[in-house]
Image: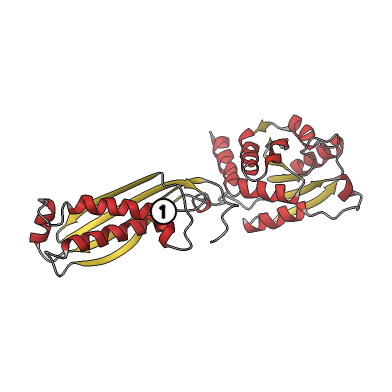
Amino acid sequence: MVNITHKSNTLRKAVAIAMVKVSSQDTIDAILEKKVPKGDVFEFARVAGLFAVKKTSDVIPDCHPLPVEYTAITYAVEGLHIVIRVEVHTIYKTGVEVEAMHGAAVTALTLYDMLKPIDKKIEIEHIRLEHKSGGKSQYPAVTGHALSCAVIVCSDSVSAAEKQDRSGKAIISRLEQFKQETNHYDVIPDEFEKIQQKVLELVEKDFDLVLFTGGTGLSARDVTPDAIRPLLDTEIPGIMETARNYGQERMPYAMFSRGVAGFIKQTLVITLPGSVKGAEESIDALFPAVLHVFKVREGAGHE
C-alpha cells in the first residue's frame, strides 16, 4: 500500500451515487409496498451497503483500513430509477471515496439480487463519485501573492564548516513542493544577538516568511526561541502546537522542542528543529495550511 504515515488526520467526506433502473412501475410499487418476496428491499440493501463500506480494505487491495466515523445510505425514486446515495465520513490520513463507491456498488447489487425474481430487466446503470472533501487538497496554498521566503540555519558546527547543512536544504526542498521559492538562505551560529540581528534584517527587507532551523532544544546553546519570542508582535501558539503534536505521533522526543512562531510586523517567523527529520516533519505538519495565515492577515488589515 501507499505510504501515508507523513499525512495528517483531517475530516474527510465522500458521497457516491449508484443508479438502478427497473423495467416497470409494478416493480417500484412492490418495493414501496414491501411486497418483494425476498423481503424489505431498501433495508436489506442498506445493511449490505453498510457492511461494504466497513469491509472495503478487505476486498480492494490498495485501500487502507480506516476508522469509518459515519455512513448514511439513502434512496430516491425517480420514475423507474432508484438513486442510491452513500455518504461516508472519517477523521484520518486518507480519503473515503472508494469506501463510498464500494458501499454504493454493493447496495445496488443487493437491490439487483432481491428484485431479479420479479423483474428480469433490472439494470445497474452507473456508479460514480459525486463529491469528496478533506485533506491538503481542500486547503491549497493560496496566499494572494508570491511569498518571499528565507531559510536560516542556526548551528555552531555548520557555521564553522565542521558539518554540512542538511536541515536547511531539506526545508528549501519541501518549500519547492508547495511552489514557494527560497529567496534568501544563510547559516549563522547559535548566538542570541546574531539570531535577533538576522531576523530583524529580514523583517526590514519585507520578507513574508522566515524559517529558522536549529536551536530549539534544551542545550545551553539552544537559544533560537529565546531570541525570537521577545521580538514577536503576535505569537501564534497553534502553529508550533500542531508541529509538536505531529512529531509526537511519530517520535516521543518531539516533546522537547521549544519552537515558537508568530508575526514580527508583517513577517511570519517560524522556528523549526535542527534535525533533518524534525524539520521535514514540521513542514509536513504545517504546510500548506499555514500559508492561509497571510489571507487571514490581509483580511484583518482591512477591518
Q: Is 62 positioned to the left or the right of 173 in the image?
A: left
Residue 106 position (above or below residue 67): below
Q: Is 16 positioned to the left or the right of 111 in the image?
A: right
Q: Provide residue 21's location: percent of width, then percent of height.
A: 19, 64
- The residue lying furthest to the bottom in this view is 121
Q: Is residue 210 visible?
A: yes
Q: Residue 166 versus residue 39: which sits nearer the camera?
A: 39
Q: Provide residue 298's location: percent of width, then percent of height.
A: 57, 40
Image quadrant assignment for residue 301? top right
- The residue lying furthest to the left in this view is 26
Q: Provide residue 204's location: percent of width, then percent of height.
A: 76, 41
Residue ID at (78%, 55%)? 166
The amino acid marked with disc number 1 is: Lys
Q: Is 272 positioned to the left or the right of 286 in the image?
A: right
Q: What residue is disc 1 on?
A: 132
* Mark 1 nearby-residue class (10 Å; few <14, some 14–19, many ≥20): some
Image quadrant assignment for residue 27? bottom left
Color style of the picture: secondary structure
Residue ID at (13%, 54%)? 31
Q: Provide residue 80's location: percent of width, then percent of height.
A: 15, 61
Image quadrant assignment for residue 237? top right
